[in-house]
Image: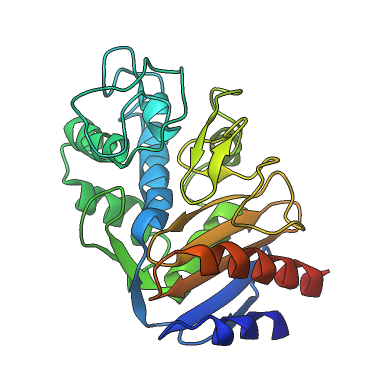
Amino acid sequence: MQALSAVDGWGAPHAYAGVVSRTGAVEARGELAAAFVWASVTKLCTALAVLVAVEEGSVALDEPAGPPGSTVRHLLAHASGLGPSDPSVPLAPPGARRIYSNAGFEVLGRHLESRTGMAFAAYLGAGVLDPLAMSGTRLDGTPAAGAVGPLVDLLALGAELLDPTIIGRSTLDEATSVAFPGLDGVLPGFGRQHPCDWGLGLEIRSDKAPHWTGSRNSAQTFGHFGQSGTFLWVDPVAGVACAVLTDRPFGPWAAVAWPELSDAVLAEMA
């Protein structure tokens, strides 16, 4: 795919990109097996692990978790009231604001451990990484930002989020629907959004502007990006997922380059 060659001009020491369709067809630029830090793209794996636990009956989305009044659903949707990094002092009541929270995902990881009796990394491996043959990925840090893995694994995750195999379609549909609609919030790196729509661990594009995906992406597009210069978006309308791994930290360059790449990919797919 010619559109992927744009990553060569991003000024990163290494920049690799790929797309996968519902048919499983993969196009890639760069090394498929080289491991990079995923940063907050990790949250997609963590959310998927929680959804697996929900289907197994180990966890319920509306059971208490986090600060008083908060649930697993609130934590997944960045609506628990917890701030970015401190899990001890809520900044708002649950359901009142969309506050992007790494702390909330760390609380989720501990909650999953308490319900399953397994270390989070072990549950993530057994429930998500192993079934999806993501053998090059490991958790080297927190459930919020600790994954390290290669492009081939990130594309496997994208394929799963297009056509789920380890969770049911109805569960994915719930995860990709807006949780607690109407909440305003800040999309890191892109400013305050009115509203700042989010699903269950998955950021939903909706009508956000500016945004890290392209103008050609449908409003139903969902995914995540990371401060390590990494992203994965899934556009269910186009039937394609696009992943990027770099070792150039997120910055103003990405806010320009990522939407341009996304639009070029979708134009070429069309």
In the foreground, 13 or 240: 13
Up the image or down, 107 lies above or below 29; here it is above
Q: How many marks?
A: 0
Residue extending furthest toward the right: 270
Give residue 139's position: percent from left, percent from top.
25, 60
Up the image or down, 153 lies above or below 129; here it is below
Give residue 115's position: percent from left, percent from top.
22, 30
Q: Residue at x 37, y 24 (%)?
A: 80
Q: Quadrant of the N terminus?
A: bottom right
Up the image or down, 230 lies above or below 142; here it is below
Q: Quadrant of the C terminus?
A: bottom right
Up the image or down, 136 lies above or below 95; here it is below
In the foreground, 73 or 181: 181
64 sits to left or right of 169 = left
- Its colouring scheme is rainbow
Q: Residue at x 40, y 38 (%)?
A: 100
Give residue 174's position: percent from left, percent from top.
57, 32
Q: Is residue 23 visible?
A: no
Residue extending furthest toward the top: 69
Query: Which quadrant of the structure image shows residue 228?
Result: bottom left
In the foreground, 232 or 193: 193
